[in-house]
Amino acid sequence: MSALPACPQCSLENTYPDADNYVCADCGHEWPMVAPASAGEDSAVIRDANGNVLADGDAVVLIKDLKVKGSSITLKMGTKVKSIRLVDGDHEVDCRMDAGNFMLKACYLKKV
């Protein structure tokens, strides 16, 4: 029996090492030999639409028109939001604008 792990995608045992990765000869899937050490920390990092790391107090700009659910308000693309606050949950950013307080997803924001 081989000491190499089975492929996580197709679960066949026809795998071989290649540099720092394992490769499945059947389906072609590649995965790292060593799991990333900081997997728990990556979930805490919140990134904007361009991949920049966001922090509390940053200024951001909306990259898309956003309709506010349950209201006739539309947040326009290009609106600058100052002093954001990062929170846990489905919507990562809590902010205050002229139209009120909103919770936004980071994928619709760009760091200024």
Image (spheres, rainbow, N blue to C red):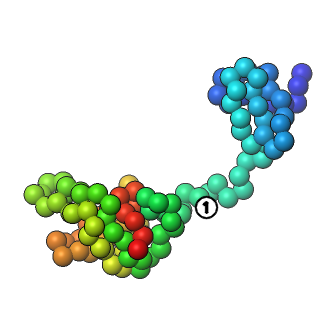
Task: Judge left or right: residue 90 versus residue 1.
Answer: left
- Residue drawn at x 19%, y 57% is 68
Query: Callout 1 environment at 10 Å: few (<14), some (14 to 19), or many (20+)?
Result: few
Q: Is residue 91 visible?
A: no
Name the spot of residue 83 as percent of width and height, x first: 36, 79
Q: Residue at x 31, y 64 (%)?
A: 62
Q: Where's the C terminus, which quadrant?
A: bottom left
Q: Is residue 107 visible from the viewing direction of this image?
A: yes
Q: Is residue 8 above or below residue 106?
A: above
Compared across the picture, whether 94 is left or right of 72 comes to: right
Residue position marked by numbered label 1 in the rendering: 41
Name the residue at 37% across, 71% down: 60
Question: Where, quadrant-wise, is the N terminus in this rendering?
Answer: top right
Relative vertical location of residue 112 with respect to residue 5 in this rendering, above or below: below
* Res 49 → quadrant: bottom left
User: From what the image shows, is residue 107 above or below residue 33?
Assistant: below
Q: Identify the element where label 1 is drawn.
A: helix
101 and 58: which one is in front?
58
Which amino acid type is shown beneath numbered disc 1?
Glu
Residue drawn at x 40%, y 60% is 106
Name the image quarter holding residue 70: bottom left
Query: Residue 31 location in percent, x, y?
Result: 71, 38
Relative placement, left or right, of 64 versus 10 is: left
